Image (cartoon, rainbow, N blue to C red):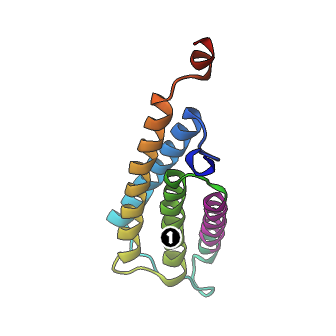
Amino acid sequence: MFMDHFAIINSRKRAIIALVHSFFFLGVAGLQLAISHAEPFSIRSEKVAAGIVLLVIYVIVTVVLLVLLRFSHCTKEKLYFAFCAASAGFGLLRILLGDPVLHANVLRVLLLSCAVFVGTGILRTHSTAAPAGEIQAR
């Protein structure tokens, strides 16, 4: 039964929060895909401060998502965090290496779309589950 329950996204409220985050970052990745070609990170760049901030953010987000992936239990939850962590990892690579032809961003949009799909399934699982009080009343 250990693999049948959610460890992190274990309530409807958490599923909604996760789904909102996924939609938001899908929108960000979609906007970047539409308007942005990333240059490789360089200390000699005129925008070095912004590059460092983005680099730190992507490192933190990627590490946090990998930790969440590690501690998740059921397959749906692991899949959700795997898609999110992979997307953040491609974002990190995009900051470091640049992406003049947008391959990394296409993958980010695809991965985040998959995360939204799985997150919707997780929300539906929590929405169709009977409330705890209803089970005890029977």
- In reply to whether residue 60 is colored magenta, the answer given is yes
Residue sitting at x 57%, y 75%: 47
Instruction: Work out whether residue 49 or residue 132 is closer to the camera in this orientation and state it.
Output: 132
Point out the stretch of residues depicted in magenta: 52-70
The amino acid at mark 1 is Gly
Residue sitting at x 48%, y 72%: 90
Residue 138: horizontal and vertical position, in percent?
57, 13
Label 1: element kind: helix
Secondary structure mostly seen in magenta is helix
What residue sits right under mark 1 in the picture? 91
Residue 4: horizontal and vertical position, in percent?
56, 46
Quadrant assignment, res 51: bottom right
Residue 111: horizontal and vertical position, in percent?
41, 62
Residue sitting at x 44%, y 54%: 115
- Against 13, residue 82 (above or below) is below
Instruction: Work out whether residue 8 or residue 30 is closer to the camera in this orientation and state it.
Output: 8
- Left or right: residue 23 compared with residue 62: left
Quadrant assignment, res 32: bottom left
- Left or right: residue 21 compared with residue 120: right
Q: Residues within 10 Å of mark 1 (few under 14, many from 20)?
A: many
Residue 75: horizontal and vertical position, in percent?
51, 55
So how many labels did they put on this image?
Answer: 1
- Against 51, residue 34 (above or below) is above
- In reply to whether residue 40 is colored magenta, the answer given is no
Residue 52 can be seen in this image = yes
Residue sitting at x 60%, y 46%: 1
